[in-house]
Image (cartoon, helix red, strand yellow):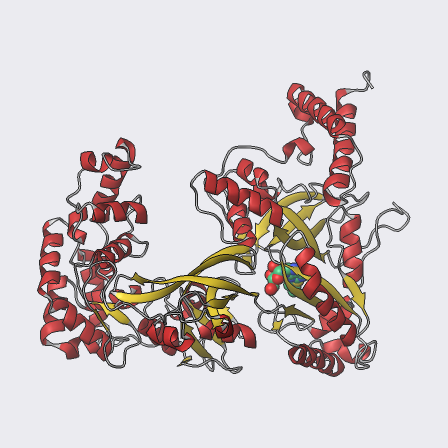
Amino acid sequence: MPDASPEARAEELCRLLQRAAHAYYVLDAPELEDTVYDRLYRELLELEAAHPELVRPDSPTQRVGGTPAAGFHAVEHRIGLLSLDNAFDAAEFAAWHQRLLRVLEKGVAAPDAGARQRDGAGDGDLALVCELKIDGNALALSYERGVLVRAATRGDGSSGEEITANVRTIQSVPLRLQLADPPEWVEVRGEAFIPDATFAAINAERLARDEPAFANPRNACAGTLRQLDPKVVAARRLDFFAYTLHLPDDWTPEIGNDPSDPPRPTTQWESLQWLQAAGFKVNPNAELLPSLAAVEGFFAQWEEGRKALAYATDGVVVKLDDLALQERAGFTQKAPRWAIALKYAAEEAPTRLRRLTVQVGRTGAVTPVAEFEPVPLAGTSVSRATLHNADRVAELDLHAGDTIVVRKAGEIIPEVVRVLSELRPAGAERLGLPHTCPECGSELVREEGEAATRCVNSSCPAILRGSLRHWVSKGALEVDGLGSKLIEQLVHRGLVRSIADLYRLDADLLASLERMGETSAGKLVAALQDSRQRPWHRVLYGLGIHHVGAVNAKALARVFLGAAELQAAATEQPEAITAVFGIGEEIAQSLAQWFGTPANLTMLAALAELGLTLQASEAERQAAAELAGAGEVAEGPDKPLAGKTLVLTGTLPTLSRSEAQTLIEAAGGKVSSSVSKKTSYVVAGAEAGSKLAKAEGLGVPLLDEAALLELLAPIR
Ligand code: IVH
C-alpha cells in the first residue's frame, strides 16, 4: 500500500499488529509469521520516527517506553479492591453458602431487597462461577474511552501504586479495548503473574549473575511490578488474567450501533465473556456451575489438575454469578459475602535430612536449623527450615539421616512437619543442640523457664554481626551500603570489634576490601557520618537492648532525654522506668542489666566521643517539657481493636513482643497465646511457627507488622 497516507498506513499497521499480538499472546493462536510481524513492526517504528505526531498511546511500539521512573505515586482506586475470605474445607465452604443463602433471603444488605426477595435466592440452587485462584498480584486497570490510562497495584485496597509504564509491557494487557463504542470508563481487575517456566529462567539468570534468587513466582512478580525501569519489566515477560469488570452504572452499549460489541453483563459469567471480547486474557478453566456439589467436584478436580498448569494457583475462587444478587449480598468489612476462596492445603513433601546446624542471633539466642536435600515446595526449591528451639528438636526426635516431611506454612515459611521414623536407618544417632557455640566455642546456656538456648559471650562474632546488622538497619541508624556480606568481612578480619569501631573505619581501608571500590567506600563513610545525626531514640533502638524495640525506645527517649538520664534511672530508680506508659518490669530489668554491664558503658562513652547523638535535641526537649506541662495525655476515644483477640508469633521487624502487646492493648484489643477459630488476627513475623500454620488451617486472617501498624494508626 505504498501510496496510502502515512496517517492511514500507521493506523492500519497498529490495527494489524494489535490483532496479531492479541492472537499470539491472548488467544495463543498466532496469525502472523514472526518475520512478517517483525517487518510490519519495523515499518511502524520507522513511520512513527518520521512522523512523531502519528504515535498513538495504544501503538504496539509504545509498550516499552521512556526512561526509568524515580519512584511510584499513590493513586486512589475508583472502586476499591477487596480481598477474599478463605474456606479450608468442605464444612467451611458449606457454612459460607448457608450464610449467603440466609443473607439473600433476608435481604439484609439492600433496602429494596423485599422487591426481589425470591428471584433465585433461597432455593439452594444459586448459580456459581468457579475460577482458579491465580497466585500472583492483583492489578487495577483503568481505561478511558477504551484506552489504558492507568494501572495500579492493589495497595491497601483503596489506594495503590501507579505502575502504568510497567503494566504496558505486559503483552496480554490490551492498550486499547477491542470495542467499537467503548464506555466512558472501564475498570478491570485481574492477576499479574509469572509463568513457572519464565520464573525458572529468571532465577537461573539471577544466580548466574550472583544475584539472589526470588523465593517464588509471586514474589518475583511483585518485585518486577515495582521495578523502576520498564525495560527490565518487559524482559521478565509477565502475564495477566482478567477476572473482574466494573462499568459506569448508566452504561449500555448503544444498541444497533455496533452489533459486535458485547452487551452489558448481568452475571459474572457474562463479565468474563465481556472481558474476553474486549481483548483480555481470561483464564480458560473457569466454569459456571449449578450447585455446591458441582463446585466441590471442580475443586477436587483441580487439586490434581493444577500441577499440570504452567502457572501457580493456590485455590479456587467461587463467586455468586448473578450481579444483582451480588449487590444484594453485599460485603463484610473487607471481603464480599458473595465470593469465597477455597484454598488448597499447603504442600508437603518428604526429603532427607542432611544435618542439624544452629544459627546464633544478635541476642545470642541459638536457633536450630534443619538442612535437607532440596525439594520443590509451592514454587520454590527449599533446603532449610528453622526448628525454633531445643524443645522442638526434642519433640521431633530427629536422628541423623532421617526422612522428614517439610511444608511451607503460609506458603512462605518452610517448616519440618514430622519425621518418618519408619524409614530411619538402623543405629542412627539422635540429634540435639550442641553444647558449645559453633561461632566462638563458649558453653551454651539455657535458663530455667526460657525457651531459648543462648551464647552469653558478648564478644561472640555471631552476636557482634547481629548487633551490627541491627545497628545499621532501617528504623535504627539506617546506614546504607553496609550489608551482611561486608559486616561479615569486617568482623572476620577483626577490623570491627564493636559498634563504635564502625565510626573509626576510613575510606582507604574500606576501599581495599573485597567487592569494595573507592566510590562505595566513600559513600559508606559519608553514610556513617550522616548516621551521627540520627536522633537519640533511634540510637537507643539501635543498641539492641532486649525488649527495647522501636516503640519502647521512642517512649523511653521522650522521658529520659539522654543516655545518662536513662542509665541513672535504669540502675537506681527502676520505678521511674516502669512509670513510662507501656514499659513494664521485664523491660526495666533488661535495661538494668544492660546498663549494669561495664562493656556496654565503655561502648556508650566511645559512641558519645565519636559524635553520635545520645541526647535529645533542643526541640525534643521543648516538646517534652510542653508535654509534661500539659499533664497526662488524654487517651483518645479510638479503640480500633476493641473486641478483637490477636495472637503474636515469630519475630516482628521493629516491634518487640511486649511493644506489640502494649500497642494492641492500648487499642482495646486482647493478646492471647493460642490460636482458635475465635482469634481475630494472627500477627506473624520471621520464623513464625505452629501458630501460623494453625491460623492458616483455621482461616484466621494473618497480619504482618506493617498491617498491624496500619490497624493501630488511629492511636499512634
Ligand atoms: S476476585 C472481590 N478472582 O486472590 C473479588 N481474585 O485472596 C476479589 N485472585 O486479591 C478478587 N485469582 O489477588 C479474584 N479468579 C480470581 C482470583 C483472585 C487470584 C487473588 C486476588 C485477590 C486475592 C484474594
The x, y position of residue 643, in whole percent, is: 47, 82
Q: Residue furthest front?
A: 426
Q: Residue furthest top?
A: 3
Using residue 224 as the reference point, say whether residue 116 is left or right of it.
right
Residue under the image location 29 percent in, 62 percent down: 361
Give residue 60's quadrant in the image.
top right
Seen from the viewer's position, the closer of residues 402 and 660 is 402
- Quarter that holds the C terminus: bottom left
Above or below, 569 against 246 in this view is below
The x, y position of residue 657, in whole percent, is: 33, 72
Seen from the viewer's position, the closer of residues 694 and 176 is 694
Quadrant observed for ligand 1 in the rendered image: bottom right
Residue under the image location 70 percent in, 43 percent down: 174
The x, y position of residue 677, in whole percent, is: 53, 82
Residue under the image location 73 percent in, 48 percent down: 280
Above or below, 680 against 181 in this view is below
Q: Is residue 319 visible?
A: no
The x, y position of residue 149, in whole percent, is: 64, 43
- Quarter that holds the N terminus: top right
Q: Is residue 243 visible?
A: yes
Q: How many marks?
A: 0
Using residue 418 as the reference point, say whether residue 440 is left or right of it.
left
Using residue 239 as the reference point, say whether residue 693 is left or right of it.
left
